[in-house]
């Protein structure tokens, strides 16, 4: 069965042929670790996890290399660290922010059923390759120095704009480019910037400083996947300027015609019909949403929409996903079946440009036909949990109260005692809080306290550790 993928660069769906079938290589831009990841950040993580699973199925698990980076050097991180830990040396504060945020990100995506990538490079561990690539660009006339900065000279790159399909003027207008008097062209991106004594910095031919955002992924993808690799993925918001600059930097520095054979981008996510933002009051973190709904519900809700299409993240769609997933799992818990691997209909749908919506239609048909083996096999192949506990966020109790008992093939939906689950969860959080207090990580201890209290328990700290008491 051939795999077809939509290529942003060519604006067409193409048959995918890997450069090396024994080592299929994919790079996806990961998080900048300065704050809790929002639900929009979950979309590329889930989408490309499904593609990772599909590639492993087609080519073999030992023949796919998936790199997803961690951006742990960025001005947003510096600002957050100074705000969060005033009075602490900036580098120490940055280390606390990036360590905690990375830990939270891993916890969030694990709850979404995401496989670990083959490699997860951090920017701070790869500054030397970044400097080496900037040096190549400068030596070939594609970069220039101005006021302590090294910049990409976009005027020297004839194909600049080929990925986003816009002219230079169109890209500059309203785009996320920094206006600076030292730039020859407003679109010229920063490859290297100077650092103060307090800011993170590394020695370079251009003085002590730190890398710009775009060069980070160019260098790290090359380090693990080579000069040219198979698939580069990310959200559509990264097409310009981030991916456009990656493509320009890599091809110019390495004298290649392409950086990746296929560029894939997932569509925008909005919440209740509006762009998600804190000012709108509709900013939703993965952490809060999985507490409300359970990770499996979030994953199913995300996959109901084709990855390239925009998605509207709504309470009503989450409610329906919860009900549907609960019916499936309860049916599987009552049935006897054998797994024969992923059903051909699901594999076929995913092989057609990762059509998860069509694959889920097949899952619905298996449920309707009471084909438990196919339903379970399809769910597992798409990374959708079969555990009813993964659907039990805080909102499931209200939904049950709204609908009363739900009938499935003559049986009531049987949930484990909700209070027992809350007690078990609070006990796990208590242990985690004791560990945080022992490590003197007071910010983490306070965060865990809040989560425990939301479950209906008071937290009491004593010489023997933390104890919990039910709220009256």
Image: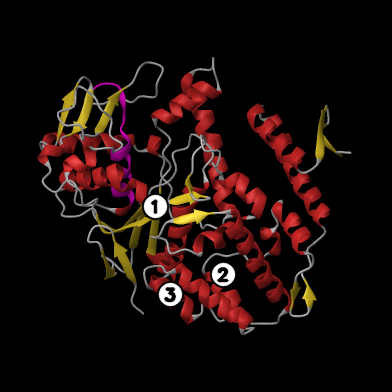
Q: Which residue is mark 3?
A: 349
Name the spot of residue 46 as percent of width and height, x first: 48, 57
Of the numbered discs in the image, which one, if any, rests on residue 380?
A: 2
Residue 369 vertical placement versus 5 (above, below): below
Name the spot of residue 248 as percent of width and height, x first: 20, 45
The residue under the point 80% across, 61% down is: 416
Label 2 residue SS: helix
The residue under the point 46% across, 65% down is: 53
The residue under the point 37% across, 15% down is: 197
Label 1 residue SS: strand
Q: Which residue is mark 1?
A: 67
Query: Real-space Cα distance between discs 3 and 2?
Result: 15 Å
Which residue occupies the foreground of this view, 267 or 47? 267
Q: Residues within 10 Å of mark 3 (few under 14, many from 20)?
A: some
Dot in front, 3 or 1: 3
Q: Is residue 265 left or right of residue 452?
A: left
Dot in front, 3 or 2: 3
Quadrant of the snapshot with the C terminus: top right
* SS majority, magenta: helix
Dot in front, 1 or 2: 2
What are the residue bounds of the magenta stretch? Answer: 207-224
Of the numbered discs in the image, which one, if any, rests on residue 234?
A: none
Query: Real-space Cα distance between discs 1 and 2?
Result: 22 Å
The residue under the point 49% across, 39% down is: 277
Query: Real-space Cα distance between discs 3 and 1?
Result: 25 Å
Q: So how many labels did they put on this image?
A: 3
Q: Quadrant of residue 59?
A: bottom left
Q: Earlier in the sequence, mark 1 or mark 2?
A: 1
Residue 122 vertical placement versus 347 (above, below): above
Q: Earlier in the sequence, mark 3 or mark 1?
A: 1
Label 3 residue SS: helix
């Amino acid at each position: 069965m051939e795999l077809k993928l939509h290529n942003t660069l060519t604006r067409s769906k193409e048959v995918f042929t890997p450069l090396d079938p024994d080592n299929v290589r994919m790079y996806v831009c990961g998080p900048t670790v300065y704050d809790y990841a929002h639900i929009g950040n979950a979309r590329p993580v889930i989408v490309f996890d499904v593609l990772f699973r599909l590639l492993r199925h087609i080519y073999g698990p030992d023949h796919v290399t998936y790199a997803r980076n961690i951006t742990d050097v960025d001005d947003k991180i510096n600002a957050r660290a100074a705000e969060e830990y005033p009075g602490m040396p900036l580098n120490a504060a940055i280390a606390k922010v990036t360590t905690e945020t990375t830990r939270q990100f891993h916890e969030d995506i694990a709850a979404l059923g995401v496989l670990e990538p083959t490699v997860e490079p951090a920017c701070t561990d790869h500054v030397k390759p970044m400097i080496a690539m900037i040096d190549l660009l400068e030596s070939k006339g594609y970069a220039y120095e101005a006021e302590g900065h090294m910049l990409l000279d976009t005027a020297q790159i004839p194909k600049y704009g080929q990925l986003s399909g816009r002219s230079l003027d169109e890209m500059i207008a309203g785009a996320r480019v920094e206006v600076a008097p030292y730039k020859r062209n407003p679109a010229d991106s920063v490859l290297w910037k100077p650092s103060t004594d307090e800011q993170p910095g590394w020695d370079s031919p251009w003085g002590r400083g730190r890398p710009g955002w775009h060069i980070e992924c160019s260098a790290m993808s090359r380090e693990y996947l080579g000069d040219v690799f198979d698939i580069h993925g990310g959200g559509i918001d990264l097409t310009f300027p981030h991916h456009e600059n990656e493509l320009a930097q890599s091809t110019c520095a390495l004298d290649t015609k392409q950086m990746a054979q296929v560029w894939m981008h997932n569509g925008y996510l909005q919440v209740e019909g509006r762009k998600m933002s804190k000012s709108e009051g509709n900013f939703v973190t993965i952490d809060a949403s999985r507490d409300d709904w359970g990770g499996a519900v979030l994953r199913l809700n995300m996959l109901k929409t084709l990855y390239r299409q925009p998605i509207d993240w709504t309470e009503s769609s989450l409610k329906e996903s919860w009900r549907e997933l609960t019916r499936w799992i309860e049916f599987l818990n009552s049935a006897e079946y054998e797994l024969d691997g992923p059903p051909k209909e699901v594999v076929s749908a995913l092989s057609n440009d990762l059509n998860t919506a069509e694959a889920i239609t097949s899952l619905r048909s298996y449920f309707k036909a009471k084909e438990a083996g196919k339903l379970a096999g399809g769910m597992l192949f798409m990374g959708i949990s079969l555990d009813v506990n993964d659907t039990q966020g805080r909102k499931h109790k209200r939904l049950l109260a709204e609908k009363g008992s739900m009938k499935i093939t003559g049986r009531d939906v049987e949930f484990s005692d909700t209070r027992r689950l809350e007690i078990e969860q609070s006990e796990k959080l208590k242990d985690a809080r004791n560990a945080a207090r022992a490590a003197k990580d007071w910010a983490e201890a306070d965060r865990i306290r809040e989560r425990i209290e939301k479950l209906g328990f008071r937290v009491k700290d004593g010489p023997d550790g933390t104890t919990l008491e039910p709220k009256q």
